Amino acid sequence: MQRRAKFFVIEGLDGSGVTTQAERLKNWLDKRGYEVSLTKEPTDGPVGALIRLHLARRLFFEKAKDSFAPLDDYTLALLFAADRMDHLNNVILPRLDSGIIVISDRYYLSSLAYQSLKLDLGWIKQMNSNCMRPDLTLFIDVPAQISKKRIERQRWHVELYEDIEILERVQQSYLKIIRELLLEGEKIKIINGNQPVQKVHSEVTNAIKKALSKTGVRSLEQLTYLPDS
């Protein structure tokens, strides 16, 4: 019976470089002979599409006559959980069971950090309690002010969670929840994202090397001897 492949997650504030590092990690593993799939949350699936419209402030529902409002916080949290379960069962698990390493640009840690700003953390954890735990989560830690500046350079519009006050609260939420999850036995590594992109990438790949070497996976020799670039 083929061993299920490894599942890695990269997390961080918007503007922290999560997508950049996820793409670089995929390319790095590709060059070393691994089959790798890069995916993301919210997904491009039916539920994820609704979430993306909401985050871009383009989704409103009729609240009363001539009155429209965005989704309430409870509904949004439920949508994130639904999108994640669809993602897990239809994308992540089938690929892992086929021997393909999966890298996800965000996963349930995002929900715990963002949604718990307004909702009960215990309730959010319960909704995500049936999610598969990653083999390793890498949190790219960048100060909120730096994240905000990067967002402003890269995009012409600001999404729902990208005001500086919210980013600062989310960063603290991430770090608090990571400490709790580490005590529960989750495998999470915090990486300083306020460094040159290549330096962050090197720290990411070093962490992945260690995670892969523990199982004696195929192409370990390549991991040992090929350069980090």
Image (cartoon, rainbow, N blue to C red):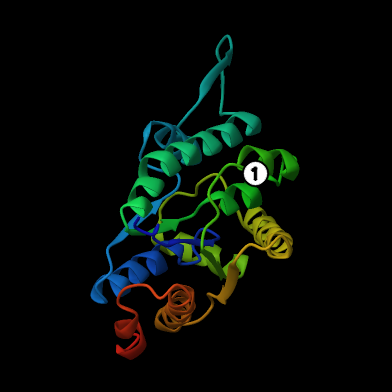
Q: Tell me: residue 227, above or below residue 58.
A: below
Say left or right for 141 vs 22: right
Furthest residue in direction top, as rendered: 65
Note whether residue 229 is visible: no
Q: What residue is rendered at 49% in x and 41% in y?
A: 84
Q: What residue is rendered at 34% in x and 65% in y?
A: 23
For badge 1, the amino acid type reads Gln
Count of numbered labels shown in the rendering: 1
Instruction: Locate residue 171, reporting x and y percent.
Output: 65, 61
Note whether residue 194 is visible: yes
Q: Tell me: residue 22, above or below residue 104.
A: below
On the image, which quarter does residue 169 sit in? bottom right
Residue closest to the eye, 213 or 228: 213
Furthest residue in direction front, as rendered: 1
Q: Residues within 10 Å of mark 1 (few under 14, many from 20)?
A: many
Q: Tell me: residue 136, above or below residue 106.
A: below
Say left or right for 101 vs 211: left
On the image, which quarter does residue 27 sit in? bottom left
Where, quadrant-wise, is the N terminus in this rendering? bottom left
Where, quadrant-wise, is the C terminus in this rendering? bottom left
Instruction: Locate residue 34, reporting x and y percent.
Output: 28, 69
Instruction: Locate residue 95, reporting x and y percent.
Output: 33, 51
Mark 1 falls on what kind of element? helix
Residue closest to the eye, 192 or 205: 205
Kindly identify which residue carries mark 1. 115
Residue closest to the eye, 157 or 126: 126
Residue closest to the eye, 17 or 191: 191
Say left or right for 105 vs 188: left
